Each structure stands twice: as C-alpha cells, then as structure tokens.
Image (cartoon, rainbow, N blue to C red):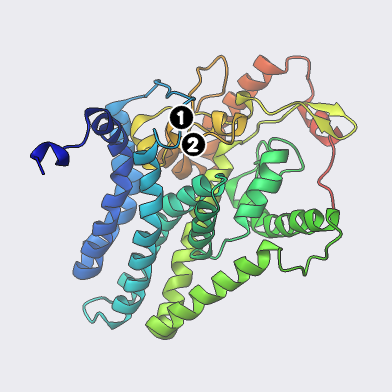
C-alpha cells in the first residue's frame, strides 16, 4: 500500500479545513477537567471562555457575511455534521464521569463543586442544547434520538416538542410562548416560559395524537421517552455521586435551562408577525428573527445567530444558513455572549434593544401606529 493511499483527497481536506472552526467547542471538554483536577480559580474558566473569550474574539475578528451553498448535500457537509455527533458521547461521558469524581475529590470545597457544575451547565446549555437543536431538526431518526439524549441530560426534553410544534409554527405571534414581548424583561419572561412551555408542548403532542384518534397515554407520545430518559439520568447521577451527585446534576441542568431561555429571549424580542384576521398571520420571513453575523460566536454556536434564516428555512443544516443585511432582517449589535449578559440587566437591555424594535416597526409596518392596541387585538394564546 502506497503512502498516497493515506492522504486525504484535496477536496475532502478543503471541506475539513472549512469546518474546523466549528469544532472549537470540543476544546471546552479538556477545560472541564483542568478545572476539576485543579480547583481554585480554574473553575471560572468555563464561563470565562464561553462568555468573555468569544466576546473578545468577535471584536477582533468582526463579521462573517459569506453564505454557504444551499444545494450542498449531507455528504458535502460531513465534517460539519460530525462535530454535533461527537459532542453527544463527549458530553455524556464528561458529565457522568464528573458526577463520580467530584463528590470524592477532597481538594474541592462545596462552593468549588457547585461553581464547577455551574460552569458545566453553561457548556451543556450553550453547546449541548444548541447541538440538540440542530439534531432535532433533522429527518434522520438517529440524530433526533441524540437530540433527546442531550435534552434529557438537562431535564428539558419537552423543548423538542415545544420548539418543533409550537415555536416554529407560531413564532412572533401571541400564540408562541417563547417570543419575548416588547418591554418584557428577562426576569418576567423566564418564569413565564418555564410555566407555559411545558404545558404548550404537552398540549401540542396531545392534539397531534387526538387527530389520529389516539389518547395522550398512547406509547407513541414522545413524553414517555422524555420521562424515561430524564428519570434514567437522575438515577445514574444518584448512583454515581450519591445525594451530592444528584444535587450537582440539578445545578448543571438548571444552569443549562437558564442559558437556553436567555437565548430564546433575545432571538425574537419585540418582533411581531402581522395579523391577517381569522387567527391567521403572515408567513414567517427573515425579518421576524434577530440576525447576528459575528464570526467567532457563530463558530461556537454553529451559526445559531443566523436565526433569521433558520426560521425562514428550518430544514437547512447549520453550515448553509444564510446571513442577511439590515434591509432584510433586524441586526443585533453584538453576538449572543454579550446580548445574553445584557438581557440580565433589563434597563440596559431596553436601552440597547427598544430603539431597534421601534426602528424595525417603522421599517416594516409603518401602517400600524398604535402597537399597544394592535397587540391587544391579536389572537390570544389558545387554552
């Protein structure tokens, strides 16, 4: 066998090279273990890297306005898809190995252990849930199952039903739980979404089964799978780490959920689809989601910030999501790491975002002069 047989063909090597920046998330796994083995200040590495390092990289590297080929096949996108598949076992092994190791690590104090799993939750929320979002949108059953595994690991399995059956259908309308209302601060949005999203997800699945003349108790209801996976992970956490391990697992899960809903909050804040009457709304367009073209944070978040195109064409895989200019979609001034931090300070958030929402309204819906009255007149959330 000649040496040339071992060389990656030039075309495949080029595809791999283009995909590599999106593999940066895997570098977070070794950082978890650096923090676990050393303790002390190193436990702050995980939030520091995901929030602040990528903010600095965004400032240094600027925007990426290039668009991929929307005709690319799954084979063309192999090296991009592979990172989302590798992440599932990488996260699973890391989380549960930590649950065994950390409660037995004498060099870690109670506060260090809690903060370490807070950092793990930042990763399982920022990366894990984001990758599950990519996987759940695919037709491949294996990928959808992997999405369920990642979501069960943060005890938020219903997100798949809520996202696919409710959010994408009703985004930017009063029927969508996770579209943040204008002037609604995150601290009001968050508890509201926690209450309503589980109910809306279960109702959507129940209604789908009813259309097939099946009760909600039918085994085809994915909630049975959600509950089984979540219960299984809770039991594993308890067996590996005892009650301390279970508590740390819950710290990780709650942090991940908070990270997810922070992102949900900023993605559609204040945006509204026009009500056409009789419960109908205009079709979803790029203008109904905030777009961000910041290069480094899009590497970390596998182009999630190209959210305008994701809602416009939900079946597109992340490498070929398109970015839009200001004439086609509203633009966030910073990437998600900065915007999520701003969302935690409602006065600062309103100062940044409310003028942009008003400008968006004037640009796309100049005929609506009283938005308060208009929003009151749209179709309410169904019960």
Percent x, y for residue 309? 55, 28
Q: Is residue 105 left or right of residue 370?
A: left
Residue at figure coordinates x 37%, y 46% from the top left: 82
Percent x, y for residue 339? 46, 38
Residue 195, above or below 106: above
Q: Is residue 310 visible?
A: yes
Residue 211, above or below 11: below
Alpha carbon of mark 2 to alpha carbon of mark 1: how far? 6 Å
Badge 2 vs badge 1, beta-carbon distance below 8 Å: yes
Q: Is residue 177 visible?
A: no
Residue at figure coordinates x 27%, y 55% from the top left: 45
**Quarter in which the N terminus is drawn:** top left
Percent x, y for residue 111? 34, 72
Secondary structure under badge 2? loop
Secondary structure under badge 1? helix
Residue 186, above or below 327: below
Residue where numbered disc 1 is placed: 320
Residue where numbered disc 2 is placed: 317
Residue at figure coordinates x 84%, y 48% from the top left: 382
């Amino acid at each position: 066998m000649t040496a040339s047989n071992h060389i990656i063909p030039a075309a495949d090597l080029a595809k791999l090279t283009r995909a590599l920046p999106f593999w940066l998330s895997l570098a977070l796994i070794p950082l978890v273990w650096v923090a676990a083995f050393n303790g002390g200040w190193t436990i702050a590495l995980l939030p520091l890297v995901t929030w602040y390092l990528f903010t600095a990289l965004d400032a240094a590297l600027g925007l990426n306005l290039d668009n991929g080929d929307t005709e690319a096949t799954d084979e063309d996108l192999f090296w991009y898809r592979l990172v989302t598949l590798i992440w599932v076992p990488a996260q699973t092994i890391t989380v549960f190995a930590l649950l065994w190791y950390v409660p037995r690590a004498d060099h870690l104090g109670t506060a260090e252990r809690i903060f370490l799993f807070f950092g793990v939750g930042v990763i399982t929320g920022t990366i894990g849930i984001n990758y599950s979002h990519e996987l759940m949108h695919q037709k491949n059953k294996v990928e959808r199952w992997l999405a369920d595994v990642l979501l069960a690991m943060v005890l938020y399995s219903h997100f798949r039903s809520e996202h696919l059956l409710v959010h994408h259908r009703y985004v930017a309308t009063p029927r969508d739980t996770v579209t943040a209302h204008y002037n609604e601060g995150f601290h009001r949005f968050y508890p509201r979404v926690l209450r309503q999203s589980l109910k809306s997800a279960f109702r959507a699945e129940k209604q789908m089964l009813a259309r097939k003349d099946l009760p909600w108790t039918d085994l085809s209801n994915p909630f049975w799978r959600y509950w089984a996976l979540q219960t299984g992970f809770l039991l594993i956490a308890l067996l590996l780490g005892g009650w301390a391990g279970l508590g740390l697992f819950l710290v990780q899960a709650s942090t991940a959920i908070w990270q997810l809903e922070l992102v949900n909050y900023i993605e559609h804040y204040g945006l509204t689809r026009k009500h056409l009457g009789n419960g109908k709304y205009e079709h979803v367009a790029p203008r109904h989601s905030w777009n961000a073209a910041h290069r480094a944070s899009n590497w970390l978040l596998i182009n999630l910030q190209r959210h305008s195109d994701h809602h416009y064409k939900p079946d597109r895989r992340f490498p070929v999501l398109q970015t839009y200019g200001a004439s086609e979609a509203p633009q966030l001034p910073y990437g998600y790491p900065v915007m999520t931090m701003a969302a935690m300070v409602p006065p600062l958030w309103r100062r940044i975002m409310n003028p942009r929402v008003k400008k968006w309204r004037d640009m796309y819906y100049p005929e609506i002069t009283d938005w308060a009255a208009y929003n009151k007149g749209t179709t309410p959330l169904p019960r």
